[in-house]
Image (cartoon, coloured by chain):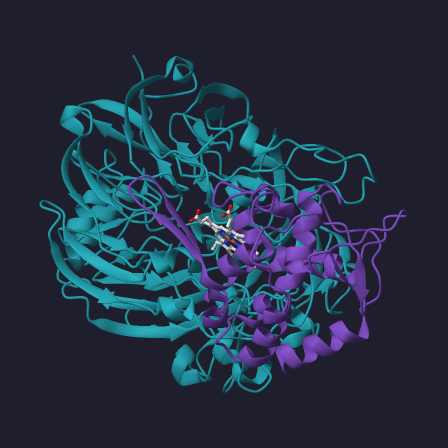
Amino acid sequence: MRCFSLTVGICMGLVATLTAASVYADSDEEKAAANPANWAMPRLNNSLTAYSTLKQINTGNVGKLQVAWTFSTGVLRGHEGAPLVIGDVMYLVTPFPNIVYALDLNHDGKIIWKYEPKQDPNVIPVMCCDTVNRGLSFGDGKIFLHQADTTLVALDAKTGKVVWSVKDGDPTKGETGTSAPFVYKDKVLVGDSGGEFGVQCHMTAYDIKDGKRVWRGYSEGPDDQTLIDPEKTTSLGKPVGKDSSLKTWQGDQWKIGGGCTWGWPSYDPQLNLIYWGSGNPSTWNPSQRPGDNKWSMTIWARDLDTGVPKWVYQMTPHDQWDYDGVNEMILTDQRINGRERKLVSHFDRNGLGYTLDRVTGELLVAQKYDPAVNWTSGVDMNKNSANYGRPTVVERYSTETPDVNHTGICPAALGTKDEQPAAYSPETQLFYVPTNHVCMDYEPFKVSYTAGQPYVGATLSMYPAPGGNNMGNFIAWDGKTGKIVWSDPELFSVWSGALATAGGVVFYGTLEGYLKAVDAKTGKLLYKFKTPSGIIGNVMTYEHGGKQYVAVLSGVGGWAGIGLAAGLTDPHAGLGAVGGYAALSNYTALGGQLTVFTLP
Amino acid sequence: MKLRAGAAGVCALTLTALWTGVVMADGSGDPAAVKNQDGKYYDKQGNPTYSIKADGTVDWYTYSGFIRYSSECLRCHGPDGLGSSYAPALVDSLKTLSYSDFLGVVAGGKKAVNTAQDLVMPSFGTDKNVMCVADDIYVYLRARSNGAIGRGRPDKHEAIPAAAKKWQDTCFGP
């Protein structure tokens, strides 16, 4: 807390212009994040709004955008996440083998240093759906890398030399690292992947100075493992009671229960709470794991210093569709029903856009953000109901019966939105959300568990939502009312994180490889440029030498590169409709590249 | 023998016994079914193969192979064996790979990790969810590779034969 009064002072001044003001004990990161020229955190700020106050590039001139410089990463696999910019240096990380580059912005990206970890390639096939890495973090003079093999490494930001390194998990049991580490105050937070391998997943906080583990909270298990306080931790306003997780699993199944944590945690410095989502319970065959499977599929609000949850809310009890709940938690302050509130908003894979009071965990809004969503008729919002807060499952789309092909379920397992994060502009008070418009057939069956081997137990076929050929939409969403304001159809799923700017322009990438700029108010396309490969990275912006730049990683891959490469078919369209939908492999090929744009 | 080593898992005994009975040394050759043994079809060289009736009904193994392929292999090889940004199209691979080559790769894995690429096919030798149904997946991919069935889930299939049910129960265990 050494800089507390100082930081509060800085914050006061900033709140007016920057909704995402931060209070940090780590003055280094705080300073970097407070400077609007930088992009010092994975989603720019601790609220994850990805809203930049830069406005040199605006609705009037964005049409003139040009490529300033490019950089090949030398790696072919899917490139998720975004680079960081701190001062004159850009930092970026590639998919496996997770090469970290420090690039000199004074010399069009000349390499200052490069760090390449040595990792056992046997981790590659354990990574579900491509060897992605969602980015780096910065703090205390260090760059933090979360490797595929779960090693968390602190590199000296100036030299690239290893300062400390710690192993977070065990890849031989199916546990891998794909998420960006997050630096909040004096801690580095790391989540794990492995929901398809029956990992008991967790979030862990490490000391930024030396990498010592401070706390670890599992997503399921006894209270001493979840760190839940039976009296103080609440769900929808009520204490959860003793062993709230254990009671919702049969026998020891929680030990292989999944609930992974590879998303994007946010942080409220005033409340000292961090927010993130836990993923799907393992296996995908629901009849094999009776119960609500708590606290998988849950929004968590944990105390940053102790890890003890203040509140939890389970979105999809007893998941039957792999609606992994890991997506980002965006913090905003908005007026709802005449009252100014501190909110957390979340676009879940299950197709519902949630808004909760982030202080208490009260559920305020839960609405479909794609009209195609059909597995639920909605969430019970009646506080006096026994089912308060639960989604009502439409019987026809339940997949509880094994060895039956359950058809026509929307959204598909990849969700109405996957990991690619949304952005929020305080000016328009709208969220900008990259979405999938894809449905599925789901056929669960019995599987057996072997440590380190996939533990899936369902087959699924995916196809575009009924009534069209487009597999994605880029939408503007009002989180206060739960309504779509505008929606731009996209041929493929939008698998790129969005950027909102004070220039009134919103940016995103497409799977064909276009960087697109649209008007924040209307969604009107203002600019597009075809980069060398499909975009699954997040668009970012920074200022250098008085000029604003926009940058994005191309490099198709991830789940999208696998699922959409050959083109989807509609199993219900009858014979002869084979290859009916666009195949991504006809539009783009592998290749990691950074493209940096600016005005002439 | 890669296969034996790969199968040295939990149900090693049964698996090895089955495989040594049918593995041929050379390519898979003509896929035409000449024998039906308890609902499982074999070509003239004794390799497992598919059987598709005129009305489109597929044999149990082809159907089961579709299900198992989609849950175990699709996440890398893409839907319907068509390949992805991550792993090769198995409908093409099977044009040259023999049954024993196939089993060898599935049980033992395959790697091409160098400066240009990071391709790793995991070894499934100890994974019952794959090894117990390796023949099913092979038969399904063989049918796909020969164009005998199209994309997606086969519409109609033969009921699970008693022998297949028994095999699954012993191989997967309780």
Residue A369, position as x, y percentages in the image: 62, 45
For the point 60% across and 60% down, the residue is B24
- Give the chain coloured cyan: A
Q: Is residue B43 left or right of residue A359?
A: right
Residue A234, position as x, y percentages in the image: 49, 75
A117 versus A363 height, above or below: above
Residue B95, by quadrant, is top right
Residue A353, position as x, y percentages in the image: 58, 51
Specify whether residue A299 is in view: no
Residue A162, by quadrant, is bottom left
Specify whether residue A512 is in view: yes
Q: Nearer the viewer, residue A201 or A205?
A: A201
Q: Residue furthest right?
A: B55
B39 versus B33 height, above or below: below
Q: Nearer the viewer, residue A176 or A155?
A: A176
Residue A545, position as x, y percentages in the image: 17, 24
Q: Nearer the viewer, residue A530 or A18?
A: A530
Q: Quadrant of the C terminus of chain A?
A: top left
For the point 78% across and 51% down, the residue is B154
Q: What colour do you see for chain B?
A: purple
Q: Is residue B3 left or right of residue A486?
A: left
